[in-house]
Image (cartoon, helix red, strand yellow):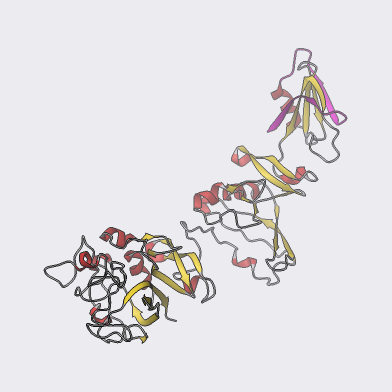
Amino acid sequence: MFHMIPGKYLPNAVLETKEQPGGISRIECAAECQSNPKCKSFNIRSANTVCELNSAVDFTPTKVALVDDAASRHYTKVPHDCADYYGVDGVHCINVNSMNRQLRVSCEEGWTVLMRRTGPDLSFDRPWLEYRDGFGDVTGDHWLGLEAFHHLTNQGNYSFMVEVKSLITGRYYWESHHGFRIGPESEKYVFNEFPQGVGNLSQNAVYWSFLFDMPFSTFDAENDNDDNRNCAEAFEGDGVNGVHNIYVKSMGKQLRVSCEAGWTVLMRRTGPDLNFNRSWTDYRIGFGDVTGDYWLGLEAFHHLTYQGNYSLMVEVRSLPTDNYYWEIHHGFRIGPESEKYVFSEFSQGDGTLIQDPEYWPSHFGMPFTTFDNDNDDENDRDCAELFQGGWWYRECTLIALTARMATTGNCTQFCFAHFKHFGVPKGERGVKTHLLNWAVMKIKKIE
């Protein structure tokens, strides 16, 4: 494949001249160049009667500048990678024969840049298709694309170089390996084995071996060998708070969740803005924003808690004192939708929230109830309608963390966690009730 520059020709590099008084076509001249291993470009001059085969290209460091000539055209072979652009860094076009098209790539000292990441602006939390096709801007941060990785590295024998800088010190590390190759999409872009290289990046000789023969994974195409299924497993304990993706094998997909000290947050409610008076479908699939207030979804509750043995932690704050209360129970599990997400029995726990030992057992064996799917034990009324929030109601007199949010002055009975009968500390049955303005439910796997 050749790139044409009209009105120009390259002097002082002519290998051979072909003249045809009747005219010579671009195709004929290109064929002559292709048949000569030393030919890197050609000129068509003198009104299409002269074909000049050149030993140089217009982008080499030792090039002679192209000369203007309206009767000439210069044709340059498009390189297969950045090696031919050595000494001329920047964005260039390369020809990848097996892709049957050109790629715009960033070249650095003859290296073809596959990925550049210099800051937080470009998101790398992307689906399979974007990792396959590439994203970003080759003039800055970008991912060239797995399809390009495959075709480029299967053109010949390639070296692979990784360069990084540390966050605190800004120290530079590098590593280079020979024989780098990425497999085709049919093999999920498998990372092929290469020999040990040189550099100061990975002192552990077995590090790269963990990648050998591994297919590529994204949040919507999980191909790794890891069964990270919750915040504690995915992020090794207590140190990585914030929103993350966790893979739930029984759901066949990843979930975006909020992690707090290794706990996976199922529900967060810190104010009145998010409406919890929702339908069965909303409670099943979830609602809200995991960066703030949200309900992760009963389907997620079920699949997460069936992955192993989980603890449940409930945290609340009361009105008007803003006192904090908490409680932890072990063996928390939510049943499948076929059982209406039944609240399974767990052992008595510890904490400062519920003084009455009968409170949590009142949930045991109870299906979930919403205003459009009444499953409570009240025959003549729907507790979800009264409390204006879905919950595992047995009766309409118990707390519900999803109920209507109220203030001390406007709640008479059915409010957000209105502890009318089973009080928080210092609450008495039927009197001195406590209202809540903040609540979190979260789970953590028991080791």
**The C terminus lies in quadrant:** bottom left
**Does residue 88 appear to the left or right of 168 in the view shown?**
right
The count of marks equals 0
Q: Which residues are magenta?
A: 1-25
Which residue is rendered at x = 57% and y = 48% of the image?
135
Residue 26, horizontal then vertical, whole percent: 71, 23
Residue 94, horizontal then vertical, whole percent: 68, 40
Residue 283, horizontal then vertical, whole percent: 30, 62
Farthest-out residue, left:
380
Quadrant in the rendering for residue 356: bottom left
Which residue is rendered at x = 46% and y = 56% of the image?
220
Which residue is rendered at x = 74% and y = 66% of the image?
171
* Residue placed most toward the observer, 268 or 133: 268
- Residue 388 falls within the magenta-colored stretch: no
* Residue placed most toward the observer, 406 or 329: 406
* Residue placed most toward the observer, 327 or 236: 327
Farthest-out residue, front:
409
Residue 57 sits above or below residue 88 on the image: above
Tell me if residue 198 can be seen: no
Residue 411 sits above or below residue 152 on the image: below
- Residue 14 falls within the magenta-colored stretch: yes
* Residue placed most toward the observer, 187 or 332: 332
